[in-house]
Amino acid sequence: MLTINIGWEYFLGVIGTLLALAYHANGRLTRIETNFEWLADAVRDLTIKAENMSAQAIETASPISLTDTGEQLLRDSGLKTYIDRRKDELTAELRAVAPLDLYTVQQSAFRLLHLISFDTAFARQLNRFAFRTGTSIDLLRRIGGIYLRDLAIAPH
């Protein structure tokens, strides 16, 4: 028979060390998860660029802008009206997170339009429009992001 006697100080030390290691490992895993967000953004950008090659909705010369097709998609999808109704709120949100650096404003507008949660009725309308025209929701959101960027930088 083998008997191991462990004092309470040693036991608390081992438990404390295990808790510290678990806390440290959790922080490292959280950083790794956060670091993969750039990869999702890069893949989304690539798919939007690939779709735009056939849709020709976005002019890729710097600064990027909407073509006539992009303007029509913006209007017909209802995104222009949606953004115009919320112009003050959306541009204020952009100005709060982005300095007056135009590239940062553009990236923030893209991220905002990607993450925005549309109300159910508008989301359904946008999905129907995307299905009917064969356009992805990501491309439509990017078109809306370009329009929002232009609204936000217009006074400057």
Image (cartoon, helix red, strand yellow):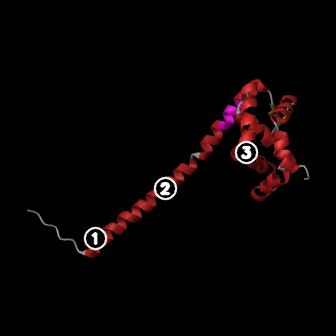
Span shown in magenta: 44-49
Q: CA distance from mark 3 to mark 2?
A: 36 Å
| Residue 97: x %, y % from top left | 74, 57
Task: Kindly identify the residue that appears in the image at 44 percent across and 57 percent down.
Answer: 25
Residue linked to disc 2: 28
Crowding at mark 2 (Cα within 10 Å: few <14, some 14-19, many 20+)? few
| Residue 35: x %, y % from top left | 57, 49
Name of the residue lying farthest toward the top: 54
Answer whether residue 102 is visible to the viewer in this image.
yes
Residue linked to disc 3: 119
Answer whether residue 63 is visible to the viewer in this image.
no
Q: CA distance from mark 1 to mark 3?
A: 54 Å
Quarter of the rendering containing residue 42: top right
Tag shown at residue 11: 1
Tag shown at residue 107: none
Q: Mark 2: which secondary structure?
A: helix
